[in-house]
Amino acid sequence: MVVGAEVVEVLDVPAAYLTKMGLGHPTYRFATFATLASLAVYIKNQVASEPSNAFRKDRTFKPLSILSYEPDAVQLHKHFLFYPVLGSFVLANVI
């Protein structure tokens, strides 16, 4: 008989950690990773004043070129949210 013993749960793979945190499904992981990565890129660009290619002077988003024919439309690969969203999608489905 062991008194005061605790059961220690061993989480040895990243998927186990994510499942324990409530991110067991790729959709949840994607949403979380995309939000965090996009927020980090947005803050970095605000500090460096670089997201001007995605915003107009009146602080509205420029449309994407694949969805709009406007002359100031941004190409998809040049939009500051493209790589965080793409990376999050890949990461959420690999883990």
Image: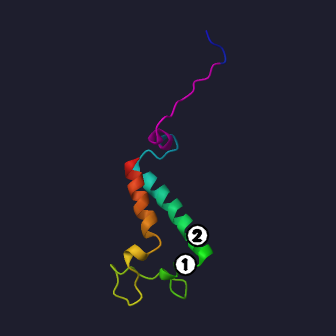
Answer left or right for 36 relative to 68. right
Q: Please name the residue shown 39% across and 58% down the image.
A: 89
* Residue sitting at the far bottom: 71
Question: Magenta region: which residues?
Answer: 5-18
**Badge 2: residue crowd in 10 Å (few <14, some 14–19, many ≥20):** few
Coloring scheme of the render? rainbow
In this rendered view, identify the residue nearer to me: 5 or 54. Answer: 54
Query: Which residue is identified by label 2?
Result: 44
Residue at screen point 43% across, 64% down: 85
| Residue type pointed to by label 1 | Glu
Q: Secondary structure at mark 1?
A: loop
56 vs 40: above or below: below
Local secondary structure at mark 2 = helix
- Give x and y (percent) for residue 55: 50, 82
Q: Give x and y (percent) for residue 87.
A: 42, 60
Closer to the N terminus: mark 2 or mark 1?
2
Q: Are marks 2 and 1 in contact (CB under 8 Å)?
A: yes
The residue where tag 1 is placed is: 50
Which quadrant of the rendered structure holds the N terminus? top right
Q: Main secondary structure of the magenta part?
A: loop
Q: Residue 8: horizontal and vertical position, in percent?
A: 57, 27
At x 38%, y 49%, the residue is: 94
The reply to whether the magenta stretch includes residue 76 is no
Give the answer, above or below, for where 46 lies relative to 71: above
Task: Residue type at mark 2: give it.
Answer: Lys
